[in-house]
Image (tube, rainbow, N blue to C red):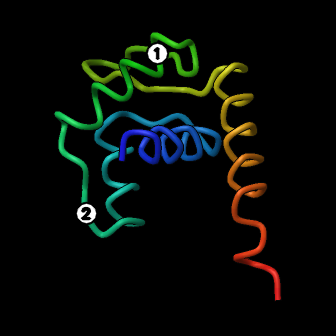
Amino acid sequence: MRGYLSFLILWLLSKKPLAGSELAEEIGKRKGVRPNPGTIYPTLADLSHRKAVSFKMQGKKKVYSLTPKGRQMLQESVDFFCHCFHDVFSK
């Protein structure tokens, strides 16, 4: 799920900046299961380390944003997915 979770985080952050708890809530709406902090925060740390996301403190919350590198990673992931699964969606 880690790659899938990274993709979802990048996609959600491409829409607007979000805190970790807001990301978990949005992912829960889409998957039906909300990821726990032990899953989401290590993924955010990894994406931050890879310079795909950055954060700003808003009070006690870290609000994450997509970086230009993260936008590029998201586009590469979308392109790869479409290349691999294009025939699933064709009629």
In percent of width and height, residue 29 lies at 37, 66
Specify the amino acid type for callout 2.
Val
Provide the residue designation for mark 1: 48
In percent of width and height, residue 91 lies at 82, 89
Of residue 52 and residue 80, the one placed in the foreground of this image is 80
Q: Is residue 59 above or below residue 65?
A: above
Q: Is residue 47 left or right of residue 69?
A: left
Label 1 Cα crowd, 10 Å radius (few <14 / some 14-19 / many 20+): some
User: Which residue is painted at 67% across and 42% down in the image?
Assistant: 77
Q: Is residue 72 left or right of residue 4?
A: right
User: Which residue is painted at 45% across and 37% down in the image?
Assistant: 18
Q: Is residue 25 above or below residue 42?
A: below
Of residue 24 and residue 79, the one placed in the foreground of this image is 79
Label 2 Cα crowd, 10 Å radius (few <14 / some 14-19 / many 20+): few
Residue 14's tag is none
Residue found at the very far right of the displayed protein: 91
User: Which residue is painted at 28% across and 28% down in the image?
Assistant: 41
User: Which residue is painted at 64% across and 40% down in the image?
Assistant: 14
Specify the amino acid type for callout 1.
Ser
Provide the residue designation for mark 2: 33
In percent of width and height, residue 1 lies at 36, 47
- Secondary structure beneath dot 2 equals loop
Q: Are marks 1 and 2 in contact (CB under 8 Å)?
A: no
Q: Quadrant of residue 43?
A: top left
- The tally of labels here is 2
Q: What is the CA distance from the residue labelled 1 to the residue labelled 2?
A: 24 Å
Q: Is residue 67 above or below residue 73?
A: above
Considering only order in the chain, which callout, 2 or 1, is on the residue closer to the N terminus?
Answer: 2
- Secondary structure beneath dot 1 equals helix
In percent of width and height, residue 47 lies at 47, 22
Of residue 51 and residue 25, the one placed in the foreground of this image is 51
